[in-house]
Amino acid sequence: MTTRYLIRFDDVVPAMAWSRFAAFEKIAADLSLPFLIGVVPECRDPKLSVEPERHDFWDWVRVRKHAGWTIAQHGYQHLYETDARGLLGIGRKSEFAGLAYNAQAQKLAAGKEIMQREGVWSGVFMAPSHSFDEFTVQALRDLEFTALTDGFGFYPYELHGLKAVPQLVARPLGFGFGVETICLHVNTMSDEAIGRMIDFIRAHRKQIISFDEALQVKATVPFIASALRHMTSAALRARRAVRA
Ligand SMILES: [Zn+2]
């Protein structure tokens, strides 16, 4: 048994920190790694714009998609409208959770349209700030999304008809089983953190899998997957409650 790792990057937008992402792009090309990236269809969040805008952004995304990366739709505009924690109970702000079904569906559809127009829509959703609710999931299903990257545990699970690969940590835990999604925000990573992660990726190349492969990871004993999901859910919520 061994841990599988899925490497996920949030907040991929035209004016992201490309200079900090460069090291990850290089290692992905060198080792043919299939990263998971969350692309904001129409970024309006000024906090995500930290370097000069890349004018060939969508070309860049298309090339990565053809190289085997998974392109997730990361919300719509990345503008937070509510402070709802959503189903997972861990975010403190949301672009979706707490809004009416129609308002959510409109945003998701507008985002999907842009992703489709650019030829990069994949049916995978990544919620800004990990916050989404029952209406979000329902709207995703109605818009023919099939999967999302979020939630507790170490094995893929089903969430009201959507397939989900859990996402718990920003750093590898390496418990020796299941799949761990390592969630990275390059805009705010230090040089040291980037260097450590590059070293980790190099050392664990054989354990790094794509989002599609992660969806196929199965627990040897079915009960274990849901037990671990409940345990990690309780632990993470408790920890965040203390911090809040
Ligand atoms: Zn984000």
Image (cartoon, helix red, strand yellow):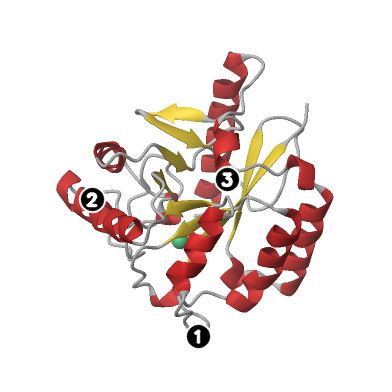
Above or below, 177 relative to 17 = above
Is residue 19 visible in the rendered structure shown here?
Answer: yes
What kind of element bears circle 3?
helix
> Comparing marks 1 and 2, which lies closer to the viewer?
1
What kind of element bears circle 2?
helix
What is the x, y in percent for residue 227?
58, 22
Above or below, 198 relative to 192 = above
Horizontally, residue 222 falls left or right of residue 32, namely left
What is the x, y in percent for residue 143?
26, 42
Q: In terms of depth relative to the viewer, which is nearer, 19 or 239?
A: 19
Image disc number at residue 65 = none
Q: Earlier in the sequence, mark 2 or mark 3?
A: 2
Q: Which residue is mark 3?
A: 239
Q: Which residue is mark 2?
A: 104
For mark 1, does the 10 Å Cα neighbourhood hold few (<14), some (14 to 19), or many (20 or more) residues? few
Q: Amino acid at mark 1?
A: Pro
Q: Which residue is mark 1?
A: 52
The furthest residue to the right: 203
What kind of element bears circle 1?
loop
Q: Amino acid at mark 2?
A: Gln
Q: Earlier in the sequence, mark 1 or mark 3?
A: 1
Quadrant of the rendered image containing residue 4? top right
Above or below, 225 relative to 203 = above
Q: Is the CB atom of the residue marked by disc 2 within 8 angstroms of ligand 1's nearest atom?
A: no
User: Residue at left 45%, top 51%?
Assistant: 72
User: Residue at left 78%, top 47%?
Assistant: 205
The furthest residue to the bottom: 52
